[in-house]
Image (cartoon, rainbow, N blue to C red):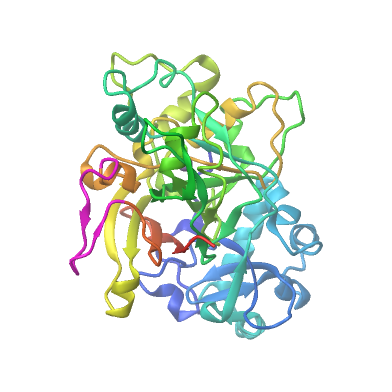
């Protein structure tokens, strides 16, 4: 577990004024990584760091001799087009040293020459196009919210909502890495088998019950060899950082196909992620205890249990989901808030899911993405997908302009946000994860 240090000092200021705005997602205490290129150019993509309203071009800084320590050459100097070939696969000491150097050159205390040198390598964030932060070799999605699992279970199996394995096994399925897309990518409504009429054969039609799922993902940094397991106490050393995830879901296809092997085409047509990877070190001030289990619940098995995980394995990340329909866009309306939830309510921590994933010797690789599953809380307002919010379409949502939604319509945009706040520390944010639904082709 990474301790807080002076890079988390809430009084740290940057010479970049927009990084000092109280509501910015990217103060000097955050410094999330991204991969970007200047929009509408043929410039090559490279690694960047978000700071205030800018992206810092890390490779250009290296060329400007701002990272002259030899160890940083290794971190940023080669194959600098994605994180899994640079900083993501380095050890945590080097990542940490690199963060300290970034704070030095961006801090209000930096000398004038340094500031001048850095300034040449800053691009306004709205002039930048973002790309996938890493080559994702494998993507696994878990089912960590007991509230989501209980709600969904009770729709399909009212007499037996939570299956007997839930409190023992961090349930997951292997998603599809090739269809993970960066925020802003348009999502085409998939076609698939629908069997709404149980007395007739299924039809192959455009998905009728298209949904989003508000999730948080983490990228594997340090890999493990095939056959090698990862202990719960080592698990976090294998996690590089976190991002927002929208696991788009076709509920009608899912309901028909999911038994007996779980989700398949209902989930693998698209998964959106936010462009910024917030590092484990940046998140150090926002750790919480793991979920406090009911006294009647079984304790986690030994390989999923440790004092450190119990004390601070959780993350206090506030999540918000907004909808902006086509009509709302035409009317110039603000996006409408659908739900608020928090990762601290997850039954399983990221360390537990990672230790479980590797517990059979499965090799995890740098750049692999793992997601929490829909983050829902106890309250109705904390439900992280439409399936739960509208109770499978039975209780439509009323939008302020008179529109209603059971599931997503063509033209709807889903906007996800995440941020951390704690007294004594600077607020940090995750940026946005957005996607517009397009009609079936
Ligand atoms: Mn999911």
258 above or below 305? below
Near-viewer residue (366 or 146): 146
Q: Quadrant of residue 69?
A: bottom right
Percent position (x, y) of residue 94? 69, 51
Percent position (x, y) of residue 172? 52, 31
Inspect this view and state whether residue 127 appears: yes
Near-viewer residue (19 or 267): 267
45 above or below 342? below
Near-viewer residue (28 or 135): 135
Give me the residue at 55% from left, 45% from top.
218
Give me the residue at 56% from left, 37% from top.
264
Instruction: Please provide the residue range marked out in magenta.
Output: 391-406
Question: In what quadrant of the picture does the C terminus appear?
Answer: bottom right
Q: Is residue 115 left or right of residue 375?
A: right
Near-viewer residue (55 or 252): 252
Inspect this view and state whether residue 143 appears: no
Percent position (x, y) of residue 244? 48, 53
Q: Is residue 129 left or right of residue 295?
A: right
Residue with the most extreme front position: 200
Q: Does the segment drawn in magenta span residue 400? A: yes
260 above or below 401? above
Percent position (x, y) of residue 294? 29, 20
């Amino acid at each position: 577990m990474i301790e807080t240090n002076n890079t988390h000092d809430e009084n740290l200021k940057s010479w970049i004024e927009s990084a000092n705005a109280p509501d910015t997602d990217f103060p000097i205490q955050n410094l999330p990584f991204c991969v970007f290129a200047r929009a509408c150019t043929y410039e090559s993509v490279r690694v960047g760091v978000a700071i205030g309203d800018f992206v810092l071009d890390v490779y250009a800084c290296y060329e400007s001799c701002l990272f002259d320590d030899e160890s940083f050459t290794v971190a940023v100097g080669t194959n600098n087009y994605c994180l899994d070939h640079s900083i993501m696969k380095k050890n945590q000491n080097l990542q940490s040293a690199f963060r300290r150097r970034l704070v030095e050159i961006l801090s209000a205390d930096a000398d004038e020459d340094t500031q001048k040198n850095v300034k040449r390598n800053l691009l306004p964030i709205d002039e930048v196009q973002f790309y996938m932060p890493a080559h994702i070799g494998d993507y696994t999605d878990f089912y960590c919210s007991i509230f989501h699992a209980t709600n969904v279970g009770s729709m399909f199996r009212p007499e037996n909502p939570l299956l007997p394995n839930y409190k023992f096994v961090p349930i997951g399925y292997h998603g599809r890495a090739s269809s993970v897309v960066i925020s802003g990518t348009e999502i085409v409504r998939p076609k698939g088998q629908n069997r709404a009429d149980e007395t007739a054969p299924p039809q192959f039609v455009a998905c009728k019950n298209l949904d989003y799922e508000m999730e948080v993902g983490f990228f594997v940094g340090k890999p493990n060899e095939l056959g090698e397991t990862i202990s719960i106490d080592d698990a976090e050393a294998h996690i590089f950082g976190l991002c927002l995830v929208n696991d788009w879901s076709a509920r009608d296809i899912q309901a028909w196909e999911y038994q007996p092997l779980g989700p398949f085409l209902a989930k693998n047509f698209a998964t959106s992620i936010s462009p910024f990877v917030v590092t484990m070190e940046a998140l150090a001030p926002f750790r919480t205890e793991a979920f406090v289990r009911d006294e009647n619940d079984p304790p986690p098995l030994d390989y999923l249990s440790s004092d450190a995980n119990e004390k601070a394995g959780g993350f206090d990340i506030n999540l918000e989901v907004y909808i902006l329909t086509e009509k709302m866009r035409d009317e110039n309306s603000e996006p409408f808030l659908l739900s608020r939830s928090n990762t601290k309510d997850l039954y399983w921590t990221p360390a537990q899911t990672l230790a479980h994933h590797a517990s059979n010797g499965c090799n995890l690789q740098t750049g692999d993405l793992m997601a929490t599953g829909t983050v829902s809380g106890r309250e109705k307002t904390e439900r992280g997908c439409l399936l739960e919010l509208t109770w499978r379409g039975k209780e439509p949502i009323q939008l302020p302009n008179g529109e209603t939604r059971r599931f997503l319509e063509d033209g709807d945009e889903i906007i996800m946000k995440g941020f951390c706040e704690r007294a004594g520390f600077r607020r940090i944010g995750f940026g946005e994860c957005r996607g517009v639904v397009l009609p079936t082709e």
